[in-house]
Image (spheres, helix red, strand yellow):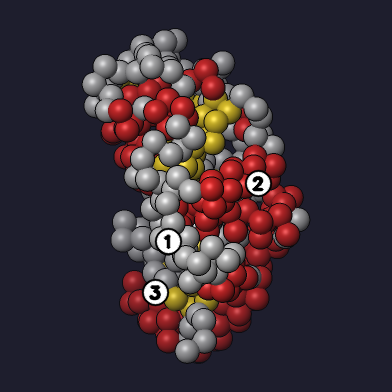
Amino acid sequence: MSRVYNFSAGPAVLPEAVLKEAQEEMLDYRGCGMSVMEMSHRSKVFDDIIQKAEADLRRLMGIPENYKVLFLQGGASLQFAMIPMNLMKNRVADYIVTGQWAKKAWQEGAKYGTANKIASSEDKTFSYIPDCSDLPISENADYVYICENNTIYGTKFKKLPNTKGKLLVSDVSSCFLSEPVNVSDYGIIYGGVQKNIGPAGMVIAIVRDDLITDDVLPFTPTMMKYKTHADAGSLYNTPNCYCIYMCGKVFEWIESMGGLEGMKKHNEEKAAILYDFLDSSNLFKGTVVKEDRSLMNVPFVTGDQEMDAKFVKEATAAGFVNLKGHRTVGGMRASIYNAMPKEGVVKLVEFMKAFEDENLK
């Protein structure tokens, strides 16, 4: 069977070149006689893998020296608790709720102190990003939290909120490495890797040095302290070795595509093809206000649930898979992450045009 066009929101499409390279090295990684899946995380061979992965990521993102790169397990959702445990010195934090994941982070934060919802777009089903230029930032807030790209609802912060000097913490799971970023704008920038970078099972957290201390909430488990992992170079316990290896290969692939500037151009071109069609279609329409549209996740509907279901079924049969929208919003969603080739979006639009012609007769 030939490969399908996989529009899944995560675990998501990976670059074919990366998969082929991993396939070639599956049984014997560069002459060591074993797979990366089998080797000790304490070995010289794996040490070279993790050191190169970190160096490549630092170069790609321009990560300053005063930030640690941590390869952690538990996915982005574990960070919902880890962040307040490590940062809530005053037991106060402000959250901007622009989707389900920001909402879950806010709810989790409330277990450890006062979590203020200072802005939200829930009133219109998270279809826009609220004005964050003059927010009621709490005087004693330990940090301001955002989810920068909303996977389910297809919105993206095009401008970071004005935190009035407070620390900014951002979940970038679904826009990680999709465009250039100024790491110094954040105290912590983190993301699950299964959308844009690698297989499921890991989160990369980039944490400013001064936030990595033993001064954490008293009940914080050892494994939930950033300092535990920073001091051990992400090797306090056995890390997700194979995932780190795969992420390293994706970092190399991104470099070969022109780095983050190249990725941004690639992603803007792809998104424009789909959004331009949605804006001109008589059957399909996007659900997000234009100025807040994500380059990564594109939700759309026909306005008729039966028609939506018919489209998803026929698209799947034609090799365009995982287009069904999240259960909380319905409709369709095309996730067009870094590794989705432009050709995949072009062919999807061709299929959508044909479906429209057939169903508007």
Is 306 placed left or right of 219 in the picture?
right
Is 171 placed left or right of 267 in the picture?
left
Q: In the image shown, does 259 or 147 lie closer to the viewer? A: 259
Q: Closer to the camera: disc 1 or disc 2?
A: 1
Q: Residue at x 66, y 29 (%)?
A: 64
Question: What residue is disc 2 on?
Answer: 56
Where is residue 325? Give x, y as percent: 39, 64
Q: Quadrant of residue 30?
A: bottom right
The crowd level at tag 3 (other Cα within 10 Å; few <14, some 14-19, many 20+) is some
Q: Quadrant of residue 322?
A: bottom left
- Name the element at disc 2: helix
Does the image show residue 91?
yes
- Name the element at disc 3: helix
Q: Residue at x 62, y 53 (%)?
A: 251
The crowd level at tag 1 (other Cα within 10 Å; few <14, some 14-19, many 20+) is some
Mark 3 or 1 closer to N-term? Answer: 1
Cα–Cα gap, marks 1 and 2: 21 Å
Mark 1 or 2 closer to N-term? Answer: 1
Where is residue 169? Give x, y as percent: 48, 30
Q: Closer to the camera: disc 2 or disc 3?
A: 2
Identify the amino acid type marked 2. Answer: Asp
Identify the amino acid type marked 3. Answer: Asp
Cα–Cα gap, marks 2 and 3: 42 Å
Cα–Cα gap, marks 3 and 1: 41 Å
Question: What residue is disc 1 on?
Answer: 37
The crowd level at tag 2 (other Cα within 10 Å; few <14, some 14-19, many 20+) is some
Question: What residue is disc 3 on?
Answer: 308
